[in-house]
Image (cartoon, rainbow, N blue to C red):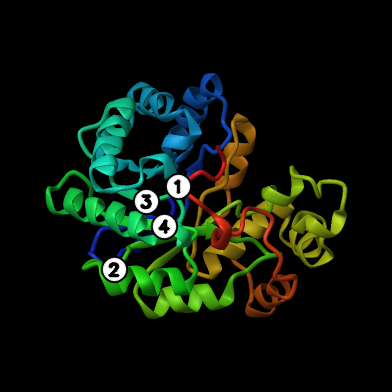
């Protein structure tokens, strides 16, 4: 019997799975089998982006799967080089074409651009049009701090349904999560098991790897789970949506095996206490339209 993730209701009534497969840095040739494996194992959310260079392969994985389109929640994102109203609409058409889909479930702005916020607003206004036209079921943002969201909501009509941000036990973003919750925004976690630290410049530093923390490994031993499964369960206990990335079939299956146990309040608090307030990825406040070029 296939297990499925619980769902979270977005602020427009659309239901989104609380767990999905991320494909950031998944090589195109490995993305198709990864998507197929995920859907076979019960995943029903796939998260990609124009900047990942694998939208076409995500679409191919969907077509090769036995799962019907309506059962899969597909997300992609607008990249910085396509910010602006008309530019965003063209970029959306391109992404939809790459994916080979008739509509998207969620379209996100990939970063705020504080130094060119008019472009961020214009891009979000384009997303509002796509929503009004029925070409996407929900819209949102990534990497937006509370001040970014406040500025955006003051100048646009629709509150973002989702805010996808770096979030893991070493960077729990409590204030941002509280802000999102107060405003009816679902917080979605990228790098949910701390891979942004584990595979980056800090890889040799054990203190930057939540999977080596005794607070996590002790709980894993108690439940007969892996440290990664414990951390992913921690996201679910916080009503977050986690999108771990993997191209390895056994890891994709293992990551999803987190629905047969739960953490106590004390265990959640112990993992919360690992927070050092230090992000591993880029600081959104410093992002410019030419960033990452």
- Whether 24 is drawn above or below 30: the answer is below
For this rendering, which residue is in front, 178 or 235?
Answer: 178
Work out whether mark 1 precedes mark 4 in sequence or the reverse, and give the earlier one: 1
Work out whether mark 1 precedes mark 3 in sequence or the reverse, and give the earlier one: 1
The residue labelled by disc 1 is 3
Residue most extreme to the top:
29
Frontmost of labels 3 and 4 is 4
The residue labelled by disc 4 is 116
Work out whether mark 4 precedes mark 2 in sequence or the reverse, and give the earlier one: 4
The residue labelled by disc 3 is 108
Frontmost of labels 1 and 3 is 3
Q: Residue at x 32, y 49 (%)?
A: 106
Q: Position of residue 293 (x, y in %)?
A: 55, 37
Q: Residue at x 46, y 53 (%)?
A: 111
The residue labelled by disc 2 is 159
Q: Are marks 2 and 3 in contact (CB under 8 Å)?
A: no
């Amino acid at each position: 019997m296939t297990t499925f993730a619980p769902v979270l209701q977005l602020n427009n009534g659309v239901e989104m799975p609380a767990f999905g497969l991320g494909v950031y840095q998944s090589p195109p040739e490995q993305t198709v089998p990864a998507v197929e494996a995920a859907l076979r194992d019960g995943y029903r959310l796939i998260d990609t982006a124009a900047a990942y260079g694998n939208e076409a392969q995500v679409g191919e994985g969907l077509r090769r799967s036995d799962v019907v389109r309506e059962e899969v929640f597909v997300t992609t994102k607008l990249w910085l080089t396509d910010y602006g109203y008309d530019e965003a609409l063209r970029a959306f058409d391109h992404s939809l074409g790459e994916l080979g889909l008739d509509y998207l479930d969620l379209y996100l702005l990939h970063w705020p651009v504080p130094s060119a916020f008019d472009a961020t607003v214009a891009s979000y206004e384009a997303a509002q049009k796509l929503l009004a036209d029925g070409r996407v079921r929900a819209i949102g943002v990534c990497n937006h701090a509370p001040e970014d969201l406040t500025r955006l909501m003051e100048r646009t009509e629709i509150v973002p349904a989702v805010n996808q941000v770096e979030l893991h036990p070493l960077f729990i973003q409590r204030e941002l999560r509280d802000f999102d919750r107060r405003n009816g925004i679902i917080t979605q976690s990228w790098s949910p098991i701390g891979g942004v630290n584990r595979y980056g410049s800090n890889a040799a530093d054990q203190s930057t790897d939540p999977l080596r923390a005794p607070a996590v490994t002790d709980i894993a031993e108690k439940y007969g789970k892996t440290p990664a499964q414990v951390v992913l369960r921690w996201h679910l206990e916080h009503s977050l949506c986690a999108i771990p990335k993997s191209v390895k079939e056994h890891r994709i299956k293992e990551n999803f095996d987190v629905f047969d146990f739960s953490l106590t309040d004390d265990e959640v608090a112990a993992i919360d206490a690992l927070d050092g307030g230090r992000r591993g990825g880029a600081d959104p406040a410093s992002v410019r339209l030419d960033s990452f070029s």
